Image: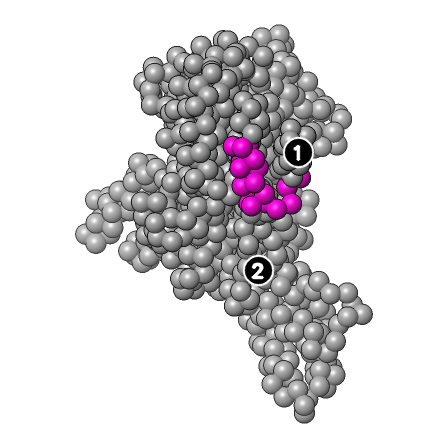
Amino acid sequence: MLPESEILNVFAVSAFDEYYLPSINRNTFEKLDSKSLFDKHFKSSFAMEDTLHIIIGLDSGLLANYVMENKPAEGSHFIFVEIDEVFKLLNIDIPSEQNHVQVCHFSELEGLLSDSRLSVFLAKRQYCIHRSLAAAGDYLLHYSLLGTQVDKLVDDIVYQESIGFSQKVFIREQLRNICENRFQAKVFSGRFDNMTAIVVAGGPSLDETIGWIKDNQSKLIIFAVSRVAGKLSEAGIVPHIIVSVDPEDFSFEVNRGMLALAGKSIFVNSYHVSSRLLSQWQGLTLYMGSRLPWSQVLDGDNIQTMGPTVTNSAVHLAINLGFKKVLLTGSDFCFSAEGFTHSKGSLETSLGPNLGFIGEWVTTYAGHKAETAVQLKLAAESLANDVAQHPQVSVCNLSKNATKIDKIPYCEHTSIVLEDCHLTPADFHQMVEAIYLNQSTEDDFYQVLNQTTTANDTFNWLVAQTQQALLALQKVKSEVHSTSLADVSTQVDSIEAEINHRYSDFSKLIKFYGYLEFSAFLSTKTQQDWDEEHMLQMSLSYYQAFHDIAKDLAAQTASAISRINNRINERKANVSLCDLAKTWRADYQPGRVHIWQKYHAKPLEKLSPPETAMFTELEAEFHQQFIRQPQVYIDVVKNQSASKKVLEKILHLVHHKHVEGLAYLSRNLLPLTQHDDDAKYLYSLSSANQLFLENKPSEALQAIQQYKGKHDEHYLKLTLQLSLTLAKLDLASDTLQKLIEYSDLYLPFYAQVLRLQGHLNQAVNIYLDYLEKYPSDVTTWLKLGMFMVDVNQIDSAFTAFSNALNADPNNQVAQDYIHQIEQACQNAE
């Protein structure tokens, strides 16, 4: 009864003389012309400069026309992704001058986005994903599934790009942290052989063990990931070590609870941790990785950061400090059965369960299926690899609801036997403090100042050398007939040789830092196809990237020099607080005023009036950071649980017949139905589809009919499917009467149900009304013709099959029926 495809080869012409597919756009373009509609929905978004717009659906081709008819914003690019069925129906022709517009099948999208020109947009997060009006309408399963596929593909690519291109963020933060990264994490390696470490992460399972940790903290060396340090402190637990690795600026807001532990715990950070967090920490720190980006000599044997999550780094740190037994809690690497990603009291949990996210499914230690993000799945795999390389270390997870990881068994925490470790957080704090006292801070700062100044001089020299190479190559390009590439190759080769001989470490750093820019130098041609012009362009691209990145790093090291001098001046008695504050404010680090106060032990009453005012301002700015919410991060989390996203997830799970996933959604939507009307609808839709897939159509129909709110097309279509499955023709007829308000395309199915009910004349009239409006619908002409044959209305049948042939002259079914009718008439004569 229901169509195999909802996309029909039937066009309509609107009152504004615009052709569209009613199966795609319903009646969207009947009340208002497409330009007016698109202006309302897309004009402001499409006006954004330097943005990649990925658009799901063409709106019968009208949206692509709209983009091409308007002058594009500078640096913008548009990719339309359309479902295969629509491609067959539209004549898509993009003029060559419209090179900022592309149209593709989903299978082609990944290839397009891998182009270096477009990958820049993704690497810089300068992209938007839009739904066409048809896709945003949420009435076609095709577009819901396509939207889900596009979202997931882009998320995965952006994540991979962030791995490939995030070195810029890492190195910039490394340079900003150059004064704070003073003591290596390796200094205590080998001192913990007979002790048990526990790595406390922020997953939901932490709530199951936090009481046990408090009771046993004298027997454990506690490694807390930074986001849970505050929660542990509130519970009366003082971690020995707090670990953080995230370079993103919002890391401060997420982790600021740890700052209260500055005098009690040691902060062990990655070299690239958020400088705003590290620089305002008022306690002792150790760093993992390398202090200087251009040299590994000083830190080659230091404990390295292990990605992709802070939990990976914390476990890696514990193993390399010499612990032979490491326990994990809150290290779930998946969502909880209630849809939460973090423990109680976290920002994420306060925003509600994450029900709209479409991830991957893993098996827990308890043998259940749980959903997870690709980043967490990769983190679990990375942890398994790390543990496998250290067979002498026993690592176990205290949560049976965590992702099951190879080489890491589940352990019931109440059965673990522990002994006192005789190393309190205060003892450990004293051990680290002793290291601080044994090294002159001023000597260290001047040493790193000299190294950074030398690096700055080197980058400036590289800028000058690559500028010479560019000028020589540009002369070849502008004077092709008088100067050849061979004429300047000796000069350019000499520059390259000197760079590699004198500054190979800096050259490697430039190419690592500028991976994105240097990717433009790579050629897709095979070497035998390289002509002189192509080689010239490759050389120009290479030296332009080298020049630009050297210039960038020269600026970064100049900024680092300024910051080092500021740190030196912080300790001088005769330097004005107002002068120091300029750098702190530029770096968003007002909390350094408290560190400055500790250096000088200066009571407020001894400050000059301007300094007193500045102190008050800086202190207020510092505390403002504790109030401010990371709104961009909050919006991302909230968006994943928006009703629209949950609906898309339900449709995705139904398409893949994922009964467990629907049961998970139904279970977690049920508590929300008490106060959320959207949740009531989504719960009914999810539970009904779950029951239908479990071959329980009667129960499914009861579930969908429990919802008494406004009925949308998805609700009605499922009701129709269930009523037909259960042969409830009256319900099917009533449902179709409501569905035809959404689209004329339900009329033929309404006619079929009427026919089954015995309302033959009404069925014929419905068919004829529909075909008068859509005379090119061959399938419906054929259905009407066969209906007429069944009721022995041969003339009407002949007319119907003839009309089918008018719409499709090669239609074999219509030809066969007409031939049979003509033969029957001849035989009757």
Q: Residue furthest left?
A: 609
Residue where numbered disc 1 is placed:
826
The three-letter amino acid code for the residue at tag 2 is: Arg
Residue 559 forms part of the magenta stretch: no
Image quadrant holding the N terminus, namely top right
Q: Where is residue 467? Give x, y as percent.
A: 58, 77
Q: Residue at x 73, y 78 (%)?
A: 532
The three-letter amino acid code for the residue at tag 1 is: Gln
Circles 2 and 1 in contact, beta carbons < 8 Å: no
Please indicate, yes or no, whether residue 316 appears anywhere in the rendered image: no
Q: How is the image coloured?
A: one colour
In the rendered structure, find residue 241 and report the number of the disc placed on it.
Answer: none
Q: Residue at x 77, y 65 (%)?
A: 526
Number of residues whose C-alpha sits closer than 10 Å to that of mark 1, classed few (under 14), some (14–19) or many (20 or more):
few
Secondary structure of residue under mark 1: helix
Q: Which quadrant of the structure image shows residue 684? A: top left
Q: Is residue 187 above or below residue 568?
A: above
**Residue 100 located left or right of residue 537:** left
Q: Is residue 706 above or below residue 341?
A: above
Query: What's drawn in magenta, residue-wise?
Result: 795-812
Q: Where is residue 569? Give x, y as percent.
A: 39, 56
**Residue 680 located left or right of residue 482:** left
Question: Alpha carbon of mark 2 to alpha carbon of mark 1: how far?
Answer: 69 Å
Q: Which quadrant of the structure image shows residue 136? A: top left
Residue where numbered disc 2 is placed:
117
Q: Residue at x 51, y 43 (%)?
A: 776
Q: Nearer the viewer, residue 431 or 559?
A: 559
Q: Where is residue 140? Give x, y as percent.
A: 48, 34
